[in-house]
Image (cartoon, grey):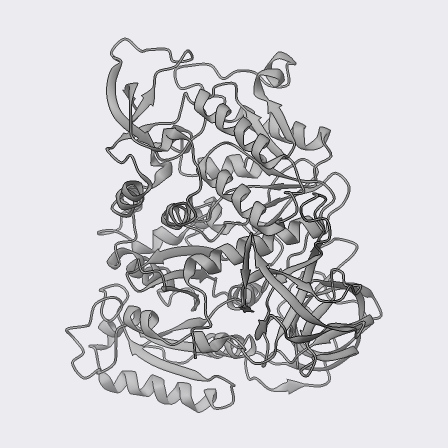
Amino acid sequence: MLDNNQLLRFTTAGSVDDGKSTLIGRLLYDSKSIFEDQLQSIENTSKKKGHNGVDLALFTDGLRDEREQGITIDVAYRYFTTPKRKFIIADTPGHIQYTRNMVTGASTANAAIILVDARHGVIEQTKRHSFIASLLQIPHIIVCINKMDLVDYSEDAYNEVINQFEEFSSKLLVQDIRFIPISALNGDNVVNRSKNMDWYQGAPLLHTLETMHISSDINKVDARFPVQTVLRPQSDKHRDYRGYAGRVASGIFRVGDEVTAMPSGFSSKIKSIDVLDESLKEAYAPMSISMTLEDDIDISRGDMIVRTNNKPESSQDIEVMLCWLNDNSAKPRTKYSIKHTSNDQKAMIKEIIYKIDIETLNRNTEDKSLNMNDISKVKIRTTKPLMVDSYRENRTTGSIILIDDTTNETVAAGMVV
Amino acid sequence: MSKYYLNYLDELESEAIYVLREVWAQFDNPVILFSGGKDSILVTHLAKKAFYPAKIPFPLMHVDTGHNFPETIQFRDNIIKELGVELIVGSVQESIDEGRVAEEKGKNATRNALQITTLLDAIETNKIDCAIGGGRRDEEKARAKERFFSHRDDFGQWDPKNQRPELWNIFNGKHFEGEHFRAFPISNWTEMDVWNYIKRENIAIPSLYFAHEREVVWRQDSWIPNSEFLVLEDHEEIVTKKIRFRTLGDITITGGIESDADTLDKIADEVSGMRQTERGNRSDDKRSESAMEDRKRQGYF
């Protein structure tokens, strides 16, 4: 594997019978990422269940309940590597009650694979998955039109799905959508080019994943550095060292840059950027570094260091698209803990502006409840200002979670509008 | 414009450092679970990077089954000295002596499951609220579902069907008195990534990982090392083979593979051509389809 190989994270979404598990099994199998003992164990189980041949879908079933029920309950992560890239798959369930898991898987993904059954075309679930992918601002969407073997590898069937998809996707904000006709079961256009679809001129799925341009997906303009912790060594050698440790959220920081600490507003210049005993000239997202400043100013966890001439909005009132993730519905006038980068505050949901009807994508301004899997636009007020960017511009400084203090559970995920 | 993106190893490193710093910021009394195996050595190395020039701000904790490779203990003691951090030992032998657990009986008896009690006892006695582990999602199918921050109830149990959703890189470590967390900074690394990184950073690892001559016995499809704890079956025979270990654990159940790989380069080459998972040589995982899931639910690493 080459030293400049990148990491690509993608999520897979599909309905129960779209063949999602089979597709992942096929990707891993054809790219030779399944080990012999794993294959042996799948072969044994396939035989026990009376399947013909190896049921590749079994490879992605993790927990005992899932093996018994034959469905995916929770997000599972899979890994494979080709000579071009390392891949992380967030394998998420497609059932309606598991929207929260898809949101979870989508939150870190560079790309989303959305599976459509060629026989059924675009259905409600396809729309829901595509909407979530666009809401979570996954930069690249690949629509795999699966089970082409069951429609005689027909180009018309493929084009029909594309037409249906484009009809509703014009309402979504997605930068890059591609379509690939596949048969996960038989392996057409997954790793290897299909011999059954000469009319398709594009690349197979794996090649697409290996070559798609992802370096420009990260915001390189707005320099944001949320401080996680302050490093103050007690040794004689580093007595005066005061390093702000964190991960660059976006943009580029260089030694000598004029920076401002928020919310205090004090300014200084970057004195050094350190990783272990090495000093760097510059740091960019998503590097974990320690930063020292020329002046001794008071900065602690939850603060954000930004370039003086490019600051995020500092506000106690934010509007977010909120996805409710918990069985306990939102309680009005209740204080929740809010987490935003390394900042921890209290917050209250002031107003529910509208709820999105996930089937039609219409806005419902009447329904003011927030239940499991609901996605709504809301107004939130926090006890102290948060330094936010819009989620569309910055996935790190534009995202929040809400925690219920009575259970400590993460109950909602929000994207700053 | 020069390249402003990280390669996969740098990205994994940065992610792990971020997780370690979050643990330090969100918990009062975290520890690194240190077994002397390559994954816990890697986590310790990343912790050094995360807090340099300050020392690693938490102790290492070793759950000692009493069935150790002497090389592992030597290595552990050296690393403690070099980093100047505290060592906490949870002893399975003591748990047995105190009657907290009973040795398994029968031919395939191991102390593997007994570690759970010792680990949970050590967590409770030392008031640990987060135990950082070297678990990786690629190791085993139950581990594929782990969060970076993984909640344990006040019995130390994991409830895989009711995990907190983990979005972006915002980790929720909030917990009630008596509960604790497990944190897994190298969740997204594969065995190959670990070796490539150890090679790149030239991280010291125990000699057991390199091919060497050793007395072994063929048992359950791998070479089990001879030791004072080994009880031979009638048909078994001790032979000398050139072997190395892919994982390190309890000496009585950690099987080696025949190998000539005696440098990091050769190991990385060998691993990239492997057709068996690394835990394939661990008899603890062979007991049933859900052996790992069952142990994890109870509080295993």
In x, y percent, where is residue B125? 72, 28
Question: Closer to the camera, A250 or A211?
Answer: A250
Quarter in which the N terminus of chain A is drawn: bottom left
Q: Quadrant of the C terminus of chain A?
A: bottom right
Count every numbered label the image shows and give the total. 0
Nearer to us in this view, B218 or B272: B272
Q: Residue at x 37, y 11 (%)?
A: B231
Q: Which residue is the extreme one toward the front?
A: A237
Q: Nearer the viewer, residue A343 or B301?
A: A343
Q: Position of residue A239 (x, y in %)?
A: 72, 48
Q: Is residue B266 above or below residue A390?
A: above
Residue at point 41% right, 89% down?
A: A166
Q: Is residue A327 above or below residue B113?
A: below
Residue at 25% from the left image edge and 77% from the top image edge: A203
Q: Is A184 above or below relative to B141?
A: below
Query: B104 or A262, which is in the foreground?
Result: A262
Quadrant in which residue A334 is drawn: bottom right
Q: Residue at x 20, y 72 (%)?
A: A193
Residue A299 position (above or below residue A138): above
Res A222 seen here:
yes
